[in-house]
Image (cartoon, rainbow, N blue to C red):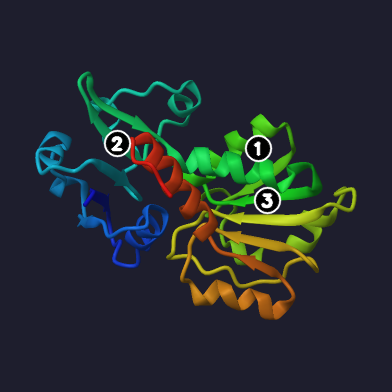
Amino acid sequence: MYKLGLLGSNISHSKSQEMYERILGEPVDYTLLDYKSEDELPSLKSLFDQGFEGLSITYPYKQTFLRDVYINDSSIKKLGAINCLKQTESGIEATNTDFLAAQKLLRDLGPERFNFLILGSGNMARVFEICLEMCKVDFQTVSRKKNGNLNELNYVDLLTEDSDQKTPLIINCCSRGFVFDTDLPKDSVFWDMNYSFPEHERLSDKGVRYQSGLDLLFWQAKFAASFWGIKPL
């Protein structure tokens, strides 16, 4: 049985174990390492000494261990955030499978067909910004830090002006503490990096195509398993 772990804060809602067991087709010894503050975090060495074959990191600790790992991928170095670790003979290697999953899903989507708007200013927002830059498509980003209350913006004008009839696609990278609750252009897509979030699922009642972050979680898990040398079904 594979021994895997997820380190983060307030992660009781995580579906990662379910996702890995679905991908691998067998039970997984999965540990949620839930720490309220950075001061409580153990060292990576002490964690891997517990026998983890793979370790994932989620919000808010994706930048915490950057000095303790090495990264081979130049694009992920540019991100300055990691979410997947393994122990090697050379030390602890890190990658960002959020980036790899987002890159794959955007390419499959056909990004030239959409008018993109990213909500947020954190690590996931930066992941999508870099992916869309690599796809060579235009996008806009708004955040509470820069724009204030995001529910007070006029998204109909923001997403339809000079859009060349492209479908508006909003990528929500805000934390679960934010609830999006305002009007969007007709037939918009709201791609929520959160999942199991009923407040946003109700957007479909307003004619918006709601898509949860479970698709990204699935591919994030596939790339993580590959990084750890675990062969999925």
Query: Is label 3 in contact with label 2 (beta carbons under 8 Å)?
Result: no
Q: Nearer the viewer, residue 119 or 93?
A: 93
Q: Residue beneath label 1, please?
A: 132
Distance between the alpha carbons at the discs numbered 3 and 1: 11 Å
Tell me which amino acid carries mark 1.
Leu
On the image, which quarter does residue 92 sit in? Answer: top left
For disc 1, the neighbor class at 10 Å (few under 14, some 14 to 19, many from 20) is many
Residue 210, by quadrant, is: bottom right
Q: Which residue corresponds to the image point at 71% horizontal and 55% vertical from the top-left?
A: 169
At label 2, the amino acid type is Leu
In the image, which is nearer the foreground, mark 1 or mark 2?
A: 2
- Tag 2, which secondary structure? strand
SS state under label 1: helix
Number of residues whose C-alpha sits closer than 10 Å to that of mark 2, classed few (under 14), some (14–19) or many (20 or more):
many
Residue 85 is marked as: 2
Q: What is the number of the mark on residue 117?
A: 3
Please name whichever residue, 232 or 41, is drawn nearer the observer in this view of the structure: 232
- In the image, 6 versus 183, the foreground residue is 6
